Image (cartoon, rainbow, N blue to C red):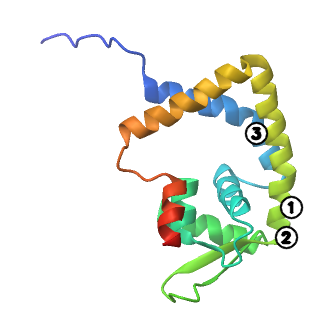
Amino acid sequence: MKPTPPFVHRNLPRLLLQAREAVMAHTRPSLRQHGLSDQQWRVLRVLGEHADDPSGVETGRVAREAYLLGPSLTGVLSRMERDGLITRERCGQDGRRTVVRATPLGLEKVETLSQTIEAHYSWMEQHLGKTKLGQLYALLDEVIALEAPDIETPEELAEEEER
């Protein structure tokens, strides 16, 4: 049996997951205090970012921007609707589509949690420095573009939808 060659590079996917979990360790207690799962928060954050759009956000866009698969999103939205955090309705222009909006309660949670999360990012910036944190964001953006050049960014998807 031939020995497996050793890896030369560190396990980047694992490091990215570890970094995500380290950051989320600061966020999760606040989410749980507000009765939210990680997935529910991602949905609320997306809806909060588009709160000024009176037509709501199409569920496909929510799935893409919150990085949730369709079947998972359906369950998450059902629980959020039950808890009064979102509303869903058929799209006025295309009855096959569903649009989602955050309710006042959902937007209140976005407002409250955004303060906690921004405070944590400020803490990170204090410890890493503004330059390093900016470099981290830029490097992550580069890795995403390098590994998935054909995948449109949420901004590009939004522009496409507007056309």
* Residue ID for mark 1: 108
Q: Height in image: 54 above or below 142?
A: below
- What residue is pinned by disc 2? 104
* Residue positioned 74% across, 66% down in the render: 51
Which residue type carries mark 2?
Pro
Query: Would you place residue 144 above or below residue 9 in this image?
Result: below
Type of amino acid under label 1: Glu
> How packed is label 3: few (under 14 Cα within 10 Å), some, or many (20 or more)?
some
* 137 w.r.t. 150: above or below: above
Q: Position of residue 72 (x, y in %)?
A: 53, 62
Instruction: Give the distance between the C-alpha atoms of the residues marked 1 and 2, in whole angstroms.
Output: 6 Å
Disc 3 vs disc 1: which is toward the camera? 1
| Front-most of residues 144 and 90 | 144
In space, the residues marked 3 and 1 are separated at their CA atoms by 17 Å
Q: CA distance from mark 3 to mark 2?
A: 22 Å
Give the residue displayed 80% in from the left and 56% down from the top. Answer: 110
Secondary structure beneath label 1:
helix
Outermost front residue: 163
In depth, the one of 81 and 45 nearer the eye is: 45
| Residue 39 in sight in this render | yes
Q: Residues within 10 Å of mark 2 (few under 14, many from 20)?
A: few
- The amino acid sitting under disc 3 is Thr
Circles 1 and 2: CB atoms closer than 8 Å: yes
- Using residue 131 as the reference point, say whether residue 156 is left or right of it: left
Q: List the residue tagged with mark 3.
A: 27
Q: Earlier in the sequence, mark 3 or mark 1?
A: 3
**Residue positioned 56% across, 56% down in the render:** 65
Q: Is residue 72 visible?
A: no
Q: Which of the 4 quarters of the picture holds residue 53?
A: bottom right
Q: Secondary structure at mark 3?
A: helix
Which is more toward the observer, 88 or 157? 157
